[in-house]
Amino acid sequence: MSTFYFLKLRLDFYDAPEIKVILSMENGYAYTVVYQKLLLLSLRSKDVGCLRLQDDLPYNDSTLSTVLNTDIDLLRGAMKMLSKLGLVSIDAAGTIVLEEAIKLAGKENTSTQRVREFRERQRQKLLTAQTDSRGSEEAHPEGEKKSAFHETFQCNTERERERETDKKAQPSASLPEKCKKVANEYSADFEVFWASYPRKVEKRKAFKTWNSTLKKGAGPADLIVAAKAYAAEGERKGRAVEYIKHPATFLGPNEAWRDFIGSPVDIEQPAGKKCPACGEVAITSSGECMSCGADYKTERAARAAAK
């Protein structure tokens, strides 16, 4: 019995904060297509969500651009942005990991497909029977009702069988050992916060503190914005990792995060300027390039001095 996978995009896929940030960039729509191609390609892997060219050979930029039929420079820009937003990661062995793939993957076998096709044939028979019987409805009203009842009952029975088959055909709720993570252990908002925070330690403790902070009235959007602002400040000041607060401390009782609340537009949205370093239209209101991390004023001053 054959099994095949398919990708289930949520209705709010394009409303996710990470996708909105990508779409706001010059090549944003192309980057989004690359991300969707990566998700689809991961469904072909024996370990859904993990991409390797072969078991002993990881992908590189050249082989991946060939497989995806994508320009290599566009692929590099997309991978850089997807990694920065936490949508894609590469482990020590070179495996490309897409944690969202396992959540978006659907699975079906040929038996389920046959049940669906059978139900459709029964539905068509019922519609045909109802159409053909309109002319003789007055002559055989009772017989028509019985026929329609039996056809409907049979369709409902097949529908129940399909539901049971679909339940058994659902994909595994976890990634393989080399990139294993319990699905749905953390909320989607927290995952965005975690991807944005500059120091990733004690994730479970951080998530517990996150929930406690939300119960006190804090909004997820404020915490995400604060994390990005704190990360940006650390990069500008060159703060060493040992001096970066643990995420649980940042979210904890002292509410250090409140010092970094700013407008989400200031943190996430490009200000419409082109970065002198990488050429992307990705400069935020704070002056930082969302694509390569360069400081707009510093780069302009350096280029002016070089002239």
Image (tube, rainbow, N blue to C red):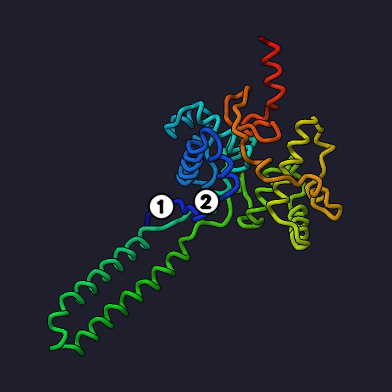
In the image shown, does 231 or 89 lie closer to the viewer? 231
- Density class for disc 1 (Cα within 10 Å; few <14, some 14-19, many ≥20) is few
- Residue under numbered circle 2: 13
Would you say 39 lies left or right of 139 here? right
Q: Residue at x 61, y 55 (%)?
A: 183
Can you see residue 54?
A: no
Q: Tags 2 and 1 in contact by the CB under 8 Å rule?
A: no
Instruction: Give the farthest residue toward the right.
Output: 254
Q: Residue at x 13, y 80 (%)?
A: 135
Would you say 290 lies left or right of 160 here? right
What residue type is disc 1 on? Phe
How far across and how far down the image is residue 95, in percent? 58, 37
Tell me the quarter of the image containing the N terminus: bottom left
How far across and how far down the image is residue 261, in percent? 75, 47
What residue type is disc 2 on? Phe
Tell me the quarter of the image containing the C terminus: top right
Tag 1, which secondary structure?
A: strand
Q: Where is 290 relative to 307, above or below?
A: below
- Residue under numbered circle 1: 4
Instruction: Give the farthest residue toward the top.
Output: 307
In the image shown, does 298 or 83 lie closer to the viewer? 298
Would you say 98 lies left or right of 129 here? right
In the image shown, does 264 or 211 lie closer to the viewer? 264
Count of labels in the image: 2
Can you see residue 154?
A: yes
Q: Residue at x 45, y 31 (%)?
A: 70
How far, Cα to Cα, is label 2 from label 1?
A: 23 Å
Disc nearest the viewer among 2 and 1: 2
Q: Earlier in the sequence, mark 2 or mark 1?
A: 1
* Picture quadrant of residue 246: top right
